[in-house]
Image (cartoon, rainbow, N blue to C red):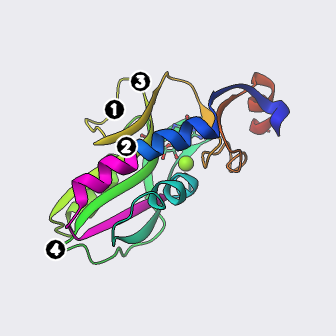
Amino acid sequence: MLEDIRKILFHESTILSRLDEMAHEITTDYRGKDLTVIAILNGSFIFVADLLRRIPLPLQVDCLGVSSYHGTKTTGSVNFRQTTVAQLRDRHVLILDDILDSGHTLHAIQERLAQEGPLSLRTCVLLRKQVERAREVDADYVAFDIPNEFVVGYGLDYNEGYRNLPFVGVLTEDAITRGMK
Ligand code: 5GP
Ligand code: MG
């Protein structure tokens, strides 16, 4: 698996110290509020686990499974793997996702969750790609901005592989070609 990595963008220690800062900010912003965190699966599972353990607030967590990517390209259509979500009325909601790219995913999720009538709705992402977005959407909390490259690791996949790498990195051309077969 490691031989498929062309370069590492963020080592685990870099990610964790940035999460310390972000968790502090989120803790300050949501202290005294009824907070529900919605984790967008699968890509955010490691990010969510590391971030939430740094937030000492009595929050609730629910997960929402969505998919939009196939290989290294966004498909533009967002599939929800479940039809019901947690009770969000009278709750402050924070969406946690792995990466903001075209914006299709976060846009669709925001629209869906807004229907539940939360007191507030914000988003937090590990990575934000510097691209022109198909949807006008931004994240309220961003751990790292990255150039327009396809990344894997720390939860992010290439055709469901590489999620368990402890860092965020870029695949070799060879690994990308191999994964297409
Ligand atoms: P968007 O809908 O904003 O284009 O993309 C959001 C979703 O696409 C993310 O939640 C993630 O699952 C996937 N995605 C976008 N960019 C990348 C990337 O560089 N690497 C990986 N592995 N997934 C990505
Ligand atoms: Mg994904």
In this view, 38 is above or below 181: below
Report the span colored magenta.
22-40
**Which comes before the other along the chain, label 2 or label 4?**
4
Q: Residue 38 lies in magenta, yes or no?
A: yes
Category of crowding for the residue at label 1, using alpha-carbon neighbours closer than 10 angstroms: few (below 14), some (14–19), many (at least 20): few
Task: Compare residues 4 and 72 and report the one nearer the observer.
Answer: 4
- Given contact means CB atoms under 8 Å apart, are the residues at marks 2 and 4 in contact? no
Q: Is the residue marked 2 within 8 Å of ligand 1, measured from its CB?
A: yes
Q: Which residue is mark 4?
A: 90
**Residue 104's disc number:** 2
Q: Quadrant of the C terminus?
A: top right
Which residue in the protein does label 1 denote? Answer: 134
Question: Does residue 132 lie above or below 75 as drawn?
Answer: above
Q: Which residue lies at the image location 37% right of the left edge and 43% below the top edge? A: 104
Mark 4 surroundings within 10 Å by alpha-carbon count, few (fewer than 14), some (14 through 19), many (20 or more): some
First in residue order: circle 1 vs circle 2: 2
Residue 94, given in percent of the width and then of the height, sits at 31, 58
> Disc 1 on helix, strand or loop?
loop
Does the residue at mark 4 contact the one at mark 3 (Cβ under 8 Å)?
no
Residue 128, x across and y down, in percent: 42, 33
Residue, disc 3 = 130
Count neighbours of disc 3 (C-alpha within 10 A) and say few if under 14, some if 14 to 19, many if 20 or more.
Answer: some
The amino acid marked with disc number 4 is Asp
